[in-house]
Image (cartoon, grey):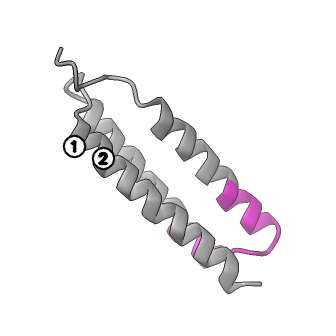
Amino acid sequence: MAASAQTATPKVADRQVNQQKRIIKGAKDGEVSKKEAVRLERQQKRINRSKKRAKADGEVTKKERAKLHARQNKASRNIKRAKKNNN
């Protein structure tokens, strides 16, 4: 296994859990509309699929990890925007 590649994605997984909680809380508190929550959930599912594809060969390269983090950053911004839109 290359030194730059790893099979685990703990930070990605932790962020996914955190983002999921933010979406659920936002929907529960009325900060995120049902339509926005569905859209955000879909985005989370796409990130999960990307993570599974990256891990499929047993290694997550720096490039794959960077792409996952970029997608999570975008998702986080989308969650923040959705919450602000309904205040």
- At 68% from the left and 51% from the top, the residue drawn is 21
Q: Count neighbours of disc 1 (C-alpha within 10 A) and say few if under 14, some if 14 to 19, many if 20 or more.
A: few
What amino acid is found at the position of numbered circle 2 in the picture? Ala
Instruction: Name the residue located 24 percent from the left edge and 22 percent from the top edge.
Output: 58
Residue 63: mark: 1
Amino acid type of the residue tagged 1 in the rendering:
Lys
Task: Where is residue 55? Give x, y as percent.
Answer: 29, 30
Stretch of the chain drawn in magenta: 22-39
Depth order, front residue of 49/60: 60
Which element is circle 1 on? helix
Give the secondary structure at mark 2. helix
| Image coords of residue 50 (percent x, y) | 31, 46
Q: Does the magenta stretch include residue 27?
A: yes
Point out which mark residue 23 bears.
none
On the rendered image, what quadrant is the C terminus found in?
bottom right
Res. 29 in view: yes
Count of picture labels = 2
Task: Assess whether mark 2 and mark 1 are in contact (beta carbons under 8 angstroms).
Answer: yes
Which residue lies most toward the top here? 1
- Residue at image position (71%, 58%) is 24
* Residue 33 seen: no
The CA distance from mark 1 to mark 2 is 5 Å
Mark 2 neighbour density, 10 Å: few (under 14) some (14–19) many (20 or more) = few
Image point 59% across, 68% down: which residue? 79
Q: Quadrant of residue 82?
A: bottom right
Q: Does the magenta stretch mainly form a helix, a strand or a loop?
A: helix
Which quadrant of the structure image shows residue 48? top left
The residue indicated by pointer 2 is 66
Question: Where residue 28 sits: x, y (%)?
Answer: 80, 65
